[in-house]
Image: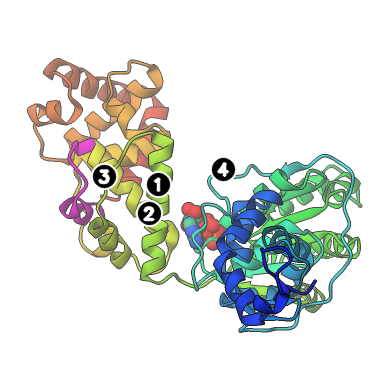
Amino acid sequence: MKLDSYGDVGGNDMTAFGNAATSKELLIDRWDEILEFLRTQFNITKVSFNTWLKNLEVKDVKDDLVILHSSDPSIGPNLSFIKNKYGAFIKNAIEEIIDDEINIDIVSDDVVTEKSERTPQQTAQSSSLLGLKLNPDYTFDNFVVSSSNAIVHAAALKVAEAPGEYYNPLYIYGDPGLGKTHLMHSIAHFILENTPSIKIMYVTSEVFMNELVEAIRHGSVAPSDFREKYRNIDVLLIDDIQFIIGKERTQEEFFHTFNYLYEAKKQIVISSDKPPRDFNNLEERLRSRFECGLTVDLTAPDFETKMAILQKKLEIKEYESNIRLNVDDDVLSYIAQSITTNIRSLEGALTKLIALSRIKRTPINIELAEEALRDIVFPNQKKSISPEYIIDVVSEHFSVSVDEILSDKRDKYIIIPRQICMFLARRYTSLSTIDLEKVFHRDHATILHGIGNVEKKLKSDDETSKTIDIITKKLNI
Ligand code: ADP
Ligand code: MG
């Protein structure tokens, strides 16, 4: 039966219902239902659904052909991928909901020809991660998509969904702090969760180089264990490739690893601070390898993106600490305006603001944000040394939290940093012992004992004086 003859009243004269316009309207009418069916019935992950399918809409209906359209520009280069991967699901979802047989086509505003497609290949092992640990927060779900990164995000997701089948290698470049590592970890997380047959290796180029040096040092001219390790995988994610560019022996070994994996149709993802063409000392044969897949760049986020990222980071911090952190939009907006390009600094500013509010036990507002961001917004102004700043630096140095320093905990690992804070606050601020009692919520005797203890150790213990030296450097007084 043709779609334009669709009617839900059995036995009626088809022409009473049967024109394409009615069918199109009907599809539009039930489109949300169709999308919901598609999402839930075919186990499509939230992030894949949002990236590829959410923005599809009915453009036209011609006989039994339903033409779908996406206004999302990042869909353009991915059309044939979407058709291959989701076409049957979309057709099926439409047929289920409208109870008729149809065909589909998908068009977009931005049709770019796709690279040649390969047949899927998989190995039969259980999905596993080798190399470095992943940051659990660096997932596609936590990645804010905007015009500055939509293409890179779409390409990364496509690689994660079908490793080795498209874009190989995927080469991601951009300035520091724009999300390269976040996307690489997202690819690894996605594969670990969704493709139960794949071996992934995530390393930085520095780790690759150190392991190679180690392998060579241990004698063998051909470091066979090393080679075995980097070849017996399905996906190689190599972060910050710039560190090995120009290092001849490492570059040579990487070239062989690359070729081996590439020829076996294994997925390679590379990140870097520059495009291949901008490296003067990159061997030509390696440059042409890097450029034979897809090269995409991350650019600085605009104001709206920065706001969305801050909101996302806040959500994660609230979830992880299980504490509601009331931060108004005007405070976030102040941060987003003050920090121009680097997303890592954006997050750093938010963390600093939250720490400051904990130390001072005051609510987060614009005044506090101005104080927290003073060094960043006015980097040339002399830093004022406050006890809060000292606690912040010391807690970071010892990897303990500000809350722990200010808590009643009596564990050794926390007492020493706490006493160092007291000592440094006495030395570098003009606060009296009575003022410090308020900052640390301790009585007079405890503050004096703490300061005295550090002074004593400074005379007798080398380790302590080294530690104080390093922290003083970090305070940058
Ligand atoms: P790079 O590797 O490019 O130097 P990272 O991937 O380490 O940058 O990102 C720096 C910080 O910015 C990380 O905390 C990361 O989560 C965050 N970040 C970058 N881009 C985004 C984004 N689009 N959405 C959410 N967080 C982001
Ligand atoms: Mg990085």
Asked if residue 141 lies left or right of residue 16, the reply is left
Whole-percent x, y for residue 459 in the image? 31, 24
Q: Answer whether residue 366 is magenta in the image.
A: yes
Q: Which residue is under mark 4? A: 136
- Disc 3 under 8 Å from ligand 1? The reply is no
Q: Answer whether residue 154 is magenta in the image.
A: no
Tell me the magenta residue range.
Answer: 359-374
Whole-percent x, y for residue 27 in the image? 61, 69
Asked if residue 422 lies left or right of residue 305, the reply is left
Disc 2/disc 1 C-alpha distance (Å): 6 Å
Of the image marks 3 and 4, the number of the one nearer the N terminus: 4
Q: Amino acid at mark 2?
A: Gln
Q: Amino acid at mark 4?
A: Pro
Disc 3/disc 4 C-alpha distance (Å): 24 Å
User: Residue 284 lies in what quarter of the image?
Assistant: bottom right
| Front disc: 4 or 1 | 1
Of the image marks 1 and 3, the number of the one nearer the N terminus: 1
Seen from the viewer's position, the closer of residues 365 and 454 is 365
Do the numbered discs 4 and 1 sit on residues whose CB atoms are within 8 Å? Answer: no
Do the numbered discs 2 and 1 sit on residues whose CB atoms are within 8 Å? Answer: yes
Q: Amino acid at mark 3?
A: Asn
